[in-house]
Amino acid sequence: MEFSVKSGSPEKQRISCVAVGVFESRKLSHSAQILDEASDGYIANLIRRGECEGKLGQTLLLHNVPNTLCDRVLLIGCGREKNFDTGSFQKTNNMVAKFLDERGATEVFSCLTELPIKSRDIAWKVSQAVQATEDALYSFDQLKTVKESTRRPLRKIIFSVPSRRELPDSEQAVRNGMAIASGMTLAKDLANLPGNICTPSYLAEQAKALGKTYRDLKVEILEESDMEELKMGSFLSVSRGSRQPAKLITMEYAGGDKNQKPIVFVGKGVTFDSGGISLKPGAAMDEMKYDMCGAASVIGVMSTCAELQLPINVVGIVPATENLPDGLATKPGDIVTSMSGTTIEILNTDAEGRLILCDALTYAGKYDPHVVIDIATLTGACIIALGNHPSGLMGNHNPLINDLLNAGKISGDRCWELPLWDDYQQQLDSNFADIANIGGKEAGTITAACFLSRFTKKYHWSHLDIAGTAWRSGKQKGATGRPVPLLTQYLLNYIAEQKL
């Protein structure tokens, strides 16, 4: 897809389609009014007859509108103007891309970037529009022998900007949006691959490929023998049941000053999770290929950093393994020793994500990080608590928590803070080891974060539970690419605050 920005009046665009918004109840947006005036009330007459009420997502395609140079005008419903927000803006841009891609309009001049959203400038709207468009047109058909194809697909979108002076910022916004969308696509592709292809070794190879593409990205792969030397007994206890060797993938992006402390992302990379000896129910177990969405998002963010050449230092750490039952697999009741020296009683082998993350979080300390953020499809309890809209957020440093909450609001990739009080820590008490790997039925998302917090006391840390946001089930089954937008926005905000 080709994206660009342009300042110009909608009725003068010689293009296959111009897209404009209509609010409830039948209120024309600014560009729609211009088109209506040029056509002597043609659009208003149709709307008065009830052709388009302006409900969110409603569409009306008009051909040969009088006194305009475009072939078609697409009216897109935007809902109530006072309720038009980030989600509405994403939905309308998503709908425009899908609708026109199916109808042979190869190019569109989109005036949706003029729609007013509180506290959001034109650059934000352009970047969001690019991301929403790419998300709408994403499909995963690499493994299909017969691929569906559109005869005349949408191939170019020009976003309207109010004036020429806003073109430079808007052009940069296009680049930002494309880089974020590319990172999301990479994360989706990795997550949508089946477990027999996307193994820990495959993830390692994809990280190496990124390292070859971007000169500022250094990639190192630690093997199980290296982990044994580091005494990562917790991580290795998970990989024992798999014939696929575990990998610890590190990606170091050096875009900032060498003395600048890095921001470290740690992504859970369980490429297939059967539950181990604590075997999961068979229904929907195929979706456990998505248990590496944390890893996929970290790899996606690292590619976005490198593509945008951000002036900061960022490290991505991915502990990658399978969790399968085998004669050598860890058993409930086994006790292992983590890299930190903490002993862990494994009461449930299906609580394996925290077992690999705790060693990766200890390893992250070697970088003397500015902050550490781990991302994991960690608990089904997070879906029960928050549903599929926000990611769960906890941590040990309030400024970091607030920065992530703010980045979520700006990006539309929201998160929500849950308490991480000491009151919950006692649920992890063990009669036989320093800590148990589960804390009972109550507050499962919180006790999982409590477990991780035991290994993050030497730095500022937050935890994102993306079990409810990383993929969709049902008819629209597939990875979402979240939280790549959230994490990228956090980095962009940090750069702006530090004036780098």
Image (spheres, rainbow, N blue to C red):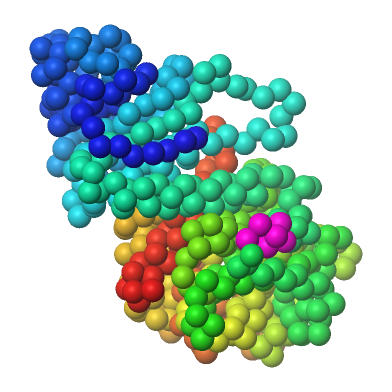
Q: Position of residue 467 (x, y in %)?
A: 53, 56
The magenta segment: 207-214
Q: Nearer the viewer, residue 332 or 121?
A: 121
Residue 329 position (above or below residue 1): below
Would you say residue 133 is visible in this rendering? yes
Give me the residue at 39% from left, 81% from top: 397
- Main secondary structure along the magenta-highlighted residues: helix
Would you say residue 275 is visible in this rendering? no
- In the displayed orientation, state which residue is furthest to the right: 327
Q: Position of residue 281 (x, y in %)?
A: 68, 49
Give me the residue at 31% from left, 52% from top: 169
Is residue 191 inside the magenta stretch? Answer: no
Give me the residue at 10% from left, 19% from top: 37
User: In which quadrant is the C terminus drawn?
Assistant: bottom left
Q: Nearer the viewer, residue 93 or 412?
A: 93
Q: Nearer the viewer, residue 182 or 240?
A: 182
- For this view, does 289 lie left or right of residue 179? right
- In the displayed orientation, state which residue is furthest to the front: 164
